[in-house]
Amino acid sequence: MALKNPNALVVASEVYLSGIGSLLNNIARNSLKNIKIFNQDVRELLFKLPSKIFDEIYIICPDPWPKARHHKRRLIKEDFLKILVKVLKRDGTVYISTDWENYAESIEEELEKIKDKFSYMKISNEGMPVTRFQERAINEGRLIHTFLLKLLEK
Ligand SMILES: C[S@@+](CC[C@H](N)C(=O)[O-])C[C@H]1O[C@@H](n2cnc3c(N)ncnc32)[C@H](O)[C@@H]1O
């Protein structure tokens, strides 16, 4: 994304050291100057940031927490979506994808709770940036469920 959009600043958030290491390698290999990395819980960053600063937010395959007793740990919840409302610019968009059908259903339930803030639709993942994790899911025959959210006027 940073390579294709040299005039955009990409803020990347991940806590997994090996993932960050691989990103650092790619940054060095491509001499990229337009990426900032946040290596802690993304919610900490979003809480602290001023409002209306992102044009687009991509949440690619958040951990699905498949066991029912762990569903409460899932990132995509109404409260988290409300933080996104704060940091998005007017007409801002959010892409959320998951390879886990049960998570896709739960994402839709959470989106229904906040439809006064976002309109949303399910879209094809074609043309979206594909991560290695997604590539593996596709190769293993799993479907990628992708949602496109649009911030309603604020
Ligand atoms: C299933 S992996 C997908 C990784 C990557 N997005 C991809 O598609 O290749 C989910 C990742 O989310 C990261 N993660 C989970 N909770 C997070 C949080 N609160 N803030 C930042 N990263 C988080 C985990 O470290 C994990 O690497």
Image (cartoon, grey):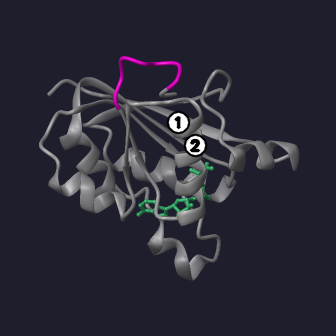
Q: Are marks 1 and 2 in contact (CB under 8 Å)?
A: yes
Residue 79 coordinates in the image, percent (x, y): 28, 58
Ligand 1 within 8 A of label 1's CB? Answer: no
Magenta stretch, main secondary structure, is: loop
- Disc assigned to residue 45: none
- Which mark is nearer the camera, 1 or 2? 2
Residue 80 coordinates in the image, percent (x, y): 32, 56
Residue 26 coordinates in the image, percent (x, y): 59, 39
Looking at the picture, does residue 124 appear above or below residue 104? above
Q: Residue at x 53, y 65 (%)?
A: 17
Q: Quadrant of residue 44?
A: bottom left
Q: Quadrant of residue 151?
A: top left
Region of the chain picked out in magenta, as a range: 3-9
Q: Is residue 95 magenta?
A: no
Looking at the picture, does residue 151 appear above or below residue 106? above
Residue annotated with mark 2: 97
Q: Which one is in front, 128 or 122? A: 128
Q: Residue at x 55, y 82 (%)?
A: 69
Q: Residue at x 47, y 57 (%)?
A: 14
Tell me the kind of residue under disc 1: Phe
Q: Residues within 10 Å of mark 1 (few under 14, many from 20)?
A: many
Looking at the picture, does residue 41 appear above or below residue 116? below
The quarter of the picture where the C terminus appears is: top left
Q: Residues within 10 Å of mark 2 (few under 14, many from 20)?
A: many
Secondary structure under tag 1 reads strand
Tell me the kind of residue under disc 2: Ser
Residue 60 coordinates in the image, percent (x, y): 55, 45
Mark 1 → mark 2, Cα distance in angstroms = 6 Å
Residue lying farthest to the bottom in this orientation: 69
Residue annotated with mark 1: 147
Disc with the residue nearer the chain's start (1 vs 2): 2
